[in-house]
Amino acid sequence: MNFSNSEINEMYLDVLKELGNIGTGNAVSALAMMIGRKINMKVPVVKMVKLQEVPEILGGAEIPVVGILLNVEGDIEGFIMFVMSQASAHLLVNMLMGTALNGYSEFTDIEKSALMEIGNILAGAYLTALSSLTGFKMIQSVPQLAEDMAGAILSFPAIQFGETGDTALYIETEIFEESSRIVADFFLIPTIESYQKMLKALGVA
Amino acid sequence: MMEIIKVGMADLNVTSYPNALTTLGLGSCVGVCIYDTKTKIIGMIHIMLPYSWGVKNNTNPAKFADTGIPLLIEKMEQLGAAKKNMVAKLAGGAQMFEVTRSEFMNIGKRNVDAAKKVLQDFDISIVAEDTGGNYGRTIIFYSEDGRLEIKTIGKGTKTI
């Protein structure tokens, strides 16, 4: 398929927006169930960005962020990655553990496990959405967490996208709970073969 | 007045004394820094992948070690640098996540190996490096003396 064809890109984005919507919906339901409170979400933003702009997404290449990475295997192979600002990650942990915000100190081991568990739940939610849209079976691995400069963390998905093109695609998710606003960038990074397989199944290739 | 010029991801730049070059948040990518000891002309490239062959979309030579480093040397020569006076320093090539899938394994190390191979082909010696690990780096390369400053989060700053 020709990725420079704007018509296909438009369709592709529509399908991915739908995936973003369903996935985020699933994720918010799962989180709300865990904490036993109502959570609101904003319709996710799906963007195609130039690789060079990727580190700017979170406000600059040197900004400290939290990245959660999972490996996907099965009919579709690749990676899932969530990137959050430290502030959003702390809010998410506090929401989950019912603790109050005590500054942005380093995450404890328990907080790190909580974040990885959230990564598990969110990845499951997006994969369920993708699975219901395509019929593909996918298994997610144990998540891994890294805290570092945005540029360094994002170099991982950027390099994976770098093998297919100069453009990266990501879904920005915003969720609200009372006065808390959490922004998480979600990257779905299939292998080149899985990418084509996935697009075909979604009816855009 | 010294100016610090930014080099983006998959980008390169050259400058001369008294300026410096910087690239922010190197993870698995590698910053290749070349210094002409006579003219104080410096060049920096932020490479993402080792080789351009086999990659469908390879229109940006600065993205790859094999196409980017020769281009960087060429740009330095255009500015008046000579290959025989060039030395190189490397930083980056970290493994940000422990990835189990073998084909994606340690792209950081592959980038470092490719950069070394290309520099060797041009007979440019590597005088210092700070590569590997599992953390990000911001680097600043000074034309004054070819020193390379490396900043990290939580692991301090050092100069090589």
Image: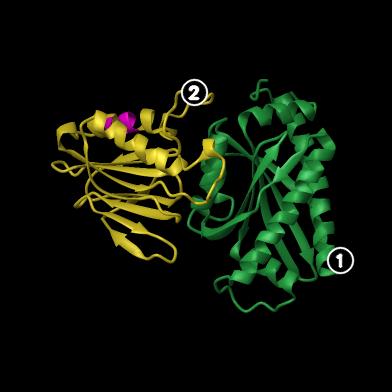
Chain colours: A green, B yellow
Q: Is residue A116 above or below residue A90?
A: above
Question: Chief secondary structure of the magenta span?
Answer: helix
Give me the C-alpha separation between circle 1 and circle 2. Answer: 49 Å
Q: Is residue A57 above or below residue B84?
A: below
Instruction: Residue at 41%, 38% (x, y): give it.
Output: B110
Between residues B93 and B5, which one lies in front from this camera angle? B93
Q: Amino acid at mark 2?
A: Gly
Quadrant where the image shows the N terminus of chain A: top right
Horizontal side, residue A158 vs residue B90: left or right = right
Q: Is residue B102 visible?
A: yes
Q: Is residue A69 above or below residue B64?
A: below
The circle drawn on residue B54 is 2
**Parent chain of label 2:** B
Q: Is residue A138 magenta?
A: no
The quarter of the displayed image where residue B29 is located = top left
Residue B148 point in image, percent of width and height: 28, 53
User: Crowding at label 2, few (<14), some or many (≥20) Cα neighbours within 10 Å?
Assistant: few
Between residues A10 and B67, which one lies in front from this camera angle? B67
Residue A42 point in image, percent of width and height: 79, 55
Between residues B137 and B129, which one lies in front from this camera angle? B129
Residue B92 point in image, percent of width and height: 39, 48
Q: Is residue B46 visible?
A: no
**Parent chain of label 1:** A
Instruction: Residue at 45%, 35% (x, y): give it.
Output: B49
Element class at badge 1: loop
Instruction: Residue at 53%, 26% (x, y): give it.
Output: B57
Quadrant where the image shows the C terminus of chain A: top right
Q: Which residues are magenta?
A: B69-73
User: Crowding at label 1, few (<14), some or many (≥20) Cα neighbours within 10 Å?
Assistant: few
Q: Amino acid at mark 1?
A: Lys
The residue under label 1 is A38
Q: Nearer the viewer, mark 1 or mark 2?
A: 2
